[in-house]
């Protein structure tokens, strides 16, 4: 497992700067698990500005005259009509409609850039290569040439401005080249607005040699370093499924509830027949959902969900895929993500997860349902 460029740079700096308290594998790369208390880092993502390493993300470029037509026939969302400087979320399916990978696709003019986790990139490139026959398409893994930082929280744009990175008002998944007057001395960077319009979040793409000084400049401007534990808390509270954890190759697109990845008017693509058949015949039998429990419930991924009906048939109705514990003391709550049979998945329905009683909850988790150490209320969005 390779370190991210940021972690290599932090290690090379010796004792200086913000240093992680722990490293671990996350989404295909070794990066910071935490810098301080994950609950404080989580609070920064919600109420201030958290900065985090996105070196676990990979990028693949597609060039050639057929790139748009070809990729539009490979993924579930509309690449054909994607404006220059705009992105879209999509799935890559097999012929049986099962999900091979997820990704963001950005139109950079002469290039399409596919962004995904490092844990998925080899599979994506191999699948792309398999389907390029007589097409004018060149696929290149550019992950080592570019890395990224993330910012999230209501003060994110303020922190960017304080660091000298002036970004315009941006739409979700819009790409911009900022006007920089910053101390980070970056040669060139690209800023991408996060997908959720209701929350401030940004990605900053830049060359690996510029990552450390940019990291330091943004921390000096007021950002709080955040590790993967807090990122997972943030993701789970928002109800965002992670490929390889909550989305597996056996899952169908509509089961994941990620309708943002699907376009039903774009024409044919690999697996499209199955997706269309599900849409035309009705809902799938199970659905992705959230589950809320009082207190701290130690529930491993894979734990079965049962109906909890002791008077009748206490039957299995689903399984857990992700779990996070929020808050301290009597305010602790546990949130799980997973799949449940549609007939058992109405919000408010009581179920059992292992030995813990849980209620099915809408995603993202209701803003009043979770509190953390400083009693800050969870904001919706990711």
Image (cartoon, grey):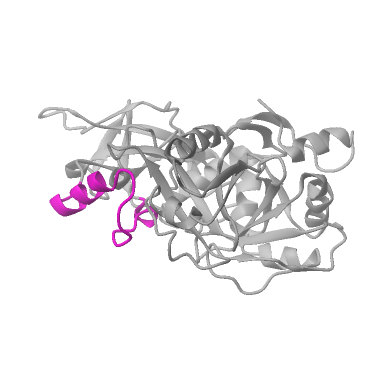
**Outermost residue to the front:** 134
Residue at point 18% right, 48% down?
277
Where residue 356 appears, x then y in whole percent? 34, 30
Horizontally, residue 27 falls left or right of residue 311, namely right
Total label count?
0
Let me know if residue 199 appears in the view. Answer: yes
Does 353 appear in magenta?
A: no
Residue at point 61% right, 53% down?
45
Where residue 301 appears, x then y in whole percent? 41, 28
Question: Which of the 4 image quarters holds residue 259?
Answer: bottom left
Q: Is residue 365 above or below residue 13?
A: below
**Outermost residue to the bottom:** 169
Where residue 168 appears, x then y in whole percent? 66, 74
Let me know if residue 369 appears in the view. Answer: no
Does 261 appear in magenta?
A: yes
Residue placed most toward the observer, 374 or 165: 165
Question: Which of the 4 image quarters holds residue 17?
Answer: top right
Q: Is residue 142 above or below residue 176?
A: above
Quarter the N terminus occupies: top right
Where residue 189 appears, x then y in whole percent? 74, 58
Horizontally, residue 213 falls left or right of residue 135, namely right
**Outermost residue to the left:** 312
Provide the residue span drawn in magenta: 258-283
Residue at point 64% right, 32% down?
29
Question: Which of the 4 image quarters holds residue 145?
Answer: top right
Residue placed most toward the observer, 254 or 361: 254
Residue placed most toward the observer, 350 or 7: 7
């Amino acid at each position: 497992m390779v370190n991210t460029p940021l972690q290599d740079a932090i290690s090379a700096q010796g004792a200086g700067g913000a240093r992680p308290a722990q490293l671990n594998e996350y989404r295909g790369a070794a990066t910071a698990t935490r810098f301080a208390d994950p609950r404080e880092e989580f609070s920064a993502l919600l109420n201030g500005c958290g900065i985090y390493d996105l070196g676990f993300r990979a990028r693949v470029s597609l060039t050639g005259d057929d790139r748009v037509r070809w990729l539009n026939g490979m993924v579930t969302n509309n690449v054909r009509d994607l404006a220059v400087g705009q992105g879209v979320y999509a799935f890559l399916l097999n012929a049986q409609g099962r999900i091979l990978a997820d990704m963001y696709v950005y139109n950079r003019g002469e290039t399409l850039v596919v962004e995904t986790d490092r844990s998925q990139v080899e599979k994506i490139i191999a699948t792309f290569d398999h389907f390029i026959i007589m097409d004018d398409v060149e696929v290149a893994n550019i992950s080592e040439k570019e890395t990224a930082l993330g910012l999230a929280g209501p003060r994110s744009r303020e922190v960017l401005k304080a660091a000298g990175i002036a970004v315009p008002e941006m739409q979700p998944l819009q790409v911009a080249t900022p006007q920089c007057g910053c101390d980070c001395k970056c040669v060139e960077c690209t800023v991408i607005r996060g997908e959720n319009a209701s929350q401030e979040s940004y990605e900053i793409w830049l060359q690996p040699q510029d990552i450390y000084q940019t990291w330091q400049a943004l921390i000096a401007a007021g950002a709080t370093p955040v590790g993967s534990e807090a990122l997972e808390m943030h993701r789970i509270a928002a109800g965002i499924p992670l490929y390889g954890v909550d989305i597996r190759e056996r899952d169908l697109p509509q089961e994941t509830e990620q309708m943002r990845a699907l376009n039903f008017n774009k024409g044919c693509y690999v697996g499209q027949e199955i997706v269309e058949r599900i849409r035309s015949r009705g809902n799938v039998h199970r659905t992705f959902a959230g589950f809320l429990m009082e207190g701290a419930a130690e529930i491993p991924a894979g734990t079965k969900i049962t109906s909890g009906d002791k008077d009748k048939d206490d039957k299995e109705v689903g399984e857990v895929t992700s779990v996070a514990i929020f808050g301290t003391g009597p305010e602790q709550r546990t949130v799980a993500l997973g799949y449940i049979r549609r007939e058992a998945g109405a919000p408010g329905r009581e179920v059992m997860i292992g030995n813990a009683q849980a209620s099915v909850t809408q995603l993202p988790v209701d803003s009043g349902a979770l509190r953390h150490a400083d009693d800050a209320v969870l904001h919706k969005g990711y």
